[in-house]
Amino acid sequence: MQPNPTLDQLQIFVTVAETGSFSAAGRRLNRAQSVISYGIANLESQLGLKLFQREGTREPQLTEFGQAMLEDARRMVSVLQRIRSRVDGHHQGLEAEVALSVDAALPAPVLVRVLKAFEAQFPTVMLRLHIGTLGLIPDHVVSGQADLGIGGLLGDVEVHLTRIGFMSIVLAAAPTHPLALLPGPVAIEDAREHTQLVVTDQSERTKGRDFGVFAYRTWRLTDMRTKHMLMREGLGWGGLPRWLIADDLASGRLVEIDLEPFSETRSPLFAMRRYDTSPKPAAAWLIDRFKRQLRCFNEFEPGEVPEDEPEPATQAS
């Protein structure tokens, strides 16, 4: 049986192909040119095929077979580099995986920016992402299903909190909705007479309690996106994050409701973790990056609320 190429030989092959010469590959790999030439010669001997054309050219040129083999070699070298990075990360205390539970109300652009940066910063760390609502986020943290939770708070929690920002909640309805047609501020008595769309907490954390519910008649929904869709169709009114409905408000598909006892609310957002654990490098990085991105997104003023100090949420449903 023919001997298999070694990963060292493949790395030499890829480096020569990328740098264009044996001498340049030697400089990149910090090896003598003779070692590079010997590595390529041994690899070609094992394969029984030429990888580089040396005759008649100043610098070695990939043969047709060498060109075809290059991508395979790159993939194998990349796998080796990931294995080495994973081992190095383990020695440094880096997690193999981070389980992240995020409230659906978190601004989507913030989540995307953070995860793109996370992929670049921690290429060897796997991510398990759960999108939930309300009490499900701290539930996941308490139960150990999530290493880190990102979201707002309703009710009492038994987790360590780090204040990372806020989201703005506004009341809105379709422009044809009766409340939207009323002149001036809407009286609470008028709001009570029309169906309010409410996202129900699927956890037991706030069972029997309502937050920001004013109407006598409600439709209870399990997710914010459905609530958004039904509001645009005029099937009720309610509160939603401003970032989610900004385009609808700008285009007139939804209009803000000026309800007398309610003003636009800044609902705080927290990073949550269990008290009996400390964040490892990737989780600690995520906490800091979410805070930075939310500050940019909302022009958050750091002095407004002391860090790590929870405050009661006034999130409208």
Image: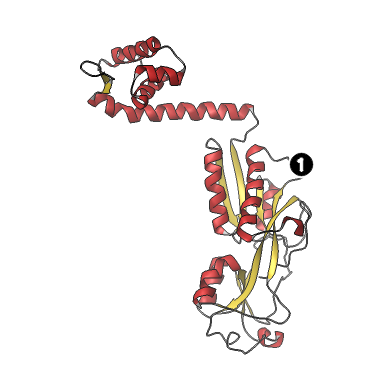
- Residue 303 x/y as whole percent: 76, 56
Q: Residues within 10 Å of mark 1 (few under 14, many from 20)?
A: few
Kindly indicate the quadrant of the structure image that contains residue 209: bottom right
Q: Residue furthest bottom?
A: 183
Helix, strand or loop at mark 1:
loop
Q: Is residue 109 left or right of residue 313?
A: left
The quadrant holding residue 66 is: top left
Identity of the residue drawn at 66% across and 84% down? 191
Q: Position of residue 312 (x, y in %)?
A: 77, 63
Q: Residue 132: where, in percent of width, then height? A: 60, 57
Q: Is residue 42 above or below residue 266?
A: above
Q: Is residue 2 visible?
A: no
Quadrant placement of the N terminus: top left
Instruction: Say left or right for 21 vs 241.
Output: left
- State the residue in front, 69 or 300: 300
Q: Amino acid at mark 1?
A: Asp
Numbered disc total: 1
Here the colouring is: secondary structure
Q: Residue at x 60, y 77 (%)?
A: 172
Q: Note whether 166 is above or below 188 in the view shown.
A: above
Which residue does the image show at 45% across and 19% down from the upper left? Answer: 29
Q: In screen coordinates, is 178 left or right of 166?
A: left
Image: 73 above or below 251 = above
Q: Which residue is mark 1?
A: 276
Relative to 168, is 172 above or below? below
Look at the image and tell me in which quarter the C terminus lies.
Answer: bottom right
Toward which corner of the image does residue 257 lie, by quadrant?
bottom right
What residue is rendered at 53% in x and 83% in y? 175
